[in-house]
Image (tube, rainbow, N blue to C red):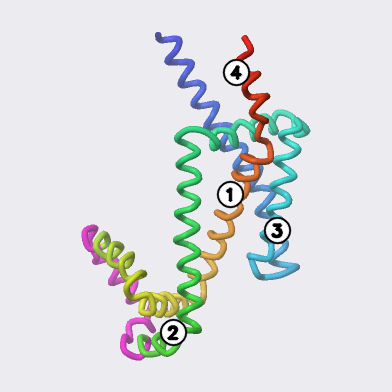
């Protein structure tokens, strides 16, 4: 029993180490490409989505064809872990949830700057604290946990019942921080979209035919 426990611990350590290596290598490839694209081609982060997606597909294909050596094997194992069981449900569910939240926020900011621009201007005139982000941040430090929970629940409901006001508030907050709110949410949206796309591509592009799976299951 002791041997099994030690084996399980070592297996978990190996899995964590492989995950860190894969994450580090992939980030070390994709992040510089994205930064180079933004710095020298276009400052629109959405513009690099196709480029990053193409590189990701190339990595997946090379790894599947065993052209990347030991790293390719680790890469395949880590991707496979997110295609079955609880990890797959968590990975796909989290990606969809965050895409909805991030995409909804981006849409709200854009709507607040266009469709609900007059409402946004009224908010900025009515609430002077919007012009002083430092003071507003200081006030948030006084908010307790229960108030944060009620606030999030209220915000969720307001999206459905008072979307113009929510859009105007998000647009004002984005202006308060010099556009960094929209920039951050756009970058995060693209990242999750790429992750979701990679998982889907691997799931369907490298899916084994049912006949082959049945043969493998039936073989001794």
**Extreme residue toward the right, this view:** 67
* Label 3 – label 1 distance at C-alpha: 13 Å
* Residue density around tag 3, few if under 14, some if 14–19, many if 20 or more, within 10 Å: few
Q: What residue did someone put label 3 on?
A: 50
Q: Earlier in the sequence, mark 3 or mark 2?
A: 3
Q: Give the residue drawn at x 45%, y 35%.
A: 86
* Label 3 – label 4 distance at C-alpha: 38 Å
Q: Nearer the viewer, mark 1 or mark 4?
A: 4
Q: Nearer the viewer, mark 3 or mark 4?
A: 4
- Which span of residues is magenta-colored? 124-147
For residue 116, the mark is: 2
In the displayed structure, 210 sits above or below 163; it is above
Q: What residue did someone put label 4 on?
A: 217
- x, y percent for residue 91: 49, 43
Secondary structure at numbered mark 3: helix
* Residue density around tag 4, few if under 14, some if 14–19, many if 20 or more, within 10 Å: few
Task: State the image quarter where residue 154 is shown.
Answer: bottom left
Q: What residue did someone put label 1 on?
A: 195
* Label 1 – label 2 distance at C-alpha: 32 Å
* Label 2 – label 4 distance at C-alpha: 59 Å
């Amino acid at each position: 029993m002791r041997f099994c426990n030690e084996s399980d611990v070592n297996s978990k350590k190996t899995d964590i180490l492989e995950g860190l290596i894969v994450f580090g290598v992939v980030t070390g490839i994709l992040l510089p490409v994205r930064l180079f694209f933004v710095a020298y081609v276009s400052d629109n982060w959405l513009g690099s989505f196709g480029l990053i997606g193409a590189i990701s597909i190339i990595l997946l294909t090379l790894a599947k064809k065993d052209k990347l050596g030991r790293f390719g094997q680790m890469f395949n194992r880590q991707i496979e872990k997110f295609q079955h069981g609880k990890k797959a449900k968590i990975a796909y569910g989290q990606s969809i949830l965050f895409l909805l939240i991030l995409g909804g926020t981006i849409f709200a900011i854009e709507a607040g700057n266009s469709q609900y621009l007059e409402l946004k201007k009224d908010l900025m005139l009515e609430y002077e604290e919007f012009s002083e982000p430092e003071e507003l941040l200081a006030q948030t430090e006084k908010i307790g946990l229960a108030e944060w929970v009620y606030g999030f629940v209220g915000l969720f409901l307001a999206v459905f019942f008072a979307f113009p006001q929510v859009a105007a508030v998000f647009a004002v907050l984005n202006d308060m921080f010099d556009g960094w709110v929209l920039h951050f949410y756009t970058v995060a949206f693209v990242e999750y979209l790429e992750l979701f796309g990679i998982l889907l591509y691997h799931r369907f592009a490298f899916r084994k035919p049912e006949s082959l799976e049945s043969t493998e299951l039936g073989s001794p």
